[in-house]
Image (cartoon, grey):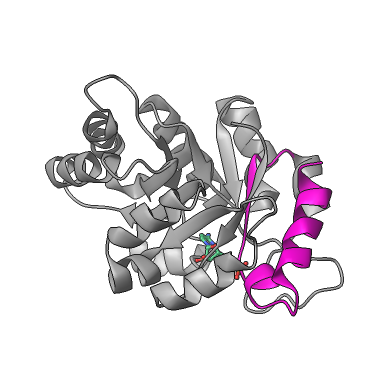
Amino acid sequence: MGKDVIVACDFSSAEQVYNFLDKFEGGRKPFVKIGMELFYAEGPQIVREIKKRGHKIFLDLKLHDIPNTVKKAMSVLSNLDVDITNLHAAGTVRMMEAAIEGLTRPDGTRPLLIAVTQLTSTDQESMENDLLIHEPIDKVVMHYAHNAKVAGLDGVVCSPLEAGKVHDTCGSNFLTVTPGVRFADGDIGDQKRVMTPAEAKKIGSDYIVVGRPITAADDPVAAYNRCVAEFVD
Ligand code: C5P
């Protein structure tokens, strides 16, 4: 898969997400991220419906449990036929290997599987005090990315600021999916370390995940097309 803009559809009902997606009828169909909020509100049917409308889907449920449970959950998710799904690398290499096993269908195909390393909401201080991890956070992020690669995963979710280093550590084919994207003239909201779509492209992100700059825009289709023009074209 090539570079693409993934729209984070952080809505709490099917009605809201369909109202939003209806605006794109007749144009380029966005790659859609379905997160916990929408999935827990509407269940797996929402994934089938959005897929039926012709969108690619990143199912962002960030699994983290014992290997056997994650394997079985991934096996169920593989039936939903999404394009990308994810888990927490903190679950260990063995959990990630089990996830790949569960996700792989009898014919050998599977959705892409990427790992969350350290959440961008975790900083050095909370990692040391709450998790008792005393290494520098960027070293921890690169180690978790390396573990994901060793387990056979396809890439990681990371800050666009880390994408270059992840590629240096894990190879250029290892995918970097990067949230924290804002337009140069836009509101950054609660994101701390942001990049524009054009900067994310320059640094080598494979996919950018963009939520509110598109979903909360006066003209979401124009905002999406601007992202595509800066990042993909
Ligand atoms: O609205 P905004 O563009 O900030 O949305 C970014 C999306 O990416 C949200 O769905 C958020 O949960 C997700 N995300 C993030 N930072 C991470 C991982 C996921 O912002 N480290």
Instruction: Name the image quarter holding the N terminus.
Output: top right
Please say if 229 is above or below 226.
above
Towards the viewer: 128 or 6: 6
Towards the viewer: 224 or 125: 224
Query: Total number of numbered labels?
Result: 0
Position of residue 78 in the picture relative to residue 13 (left or right)? left
What residue is drawn where x is 20% and y is 44%? 76
What residue is drawn where x is 61% and y is 58%? 179
Magenta-drawn segment: 204-233
State whether residue 191 appears in this view: no
What residue is drawn where x is 70% and y is 53%? 27
Quick check: is 129 in the magenta stretch?
no
Q: Quadrant of ligand 1?
A: bottom right
Q: Position of residue 31 (x, y in %)?
A: 57, 50
Towards the viewer: 232 or 121: 232
As drawn, the residue found furthest toward the top would be: 107
Please say if 163 is above or below 118.
above
Position of residue 152 in the picture relative to residue 78 (left or right)? right
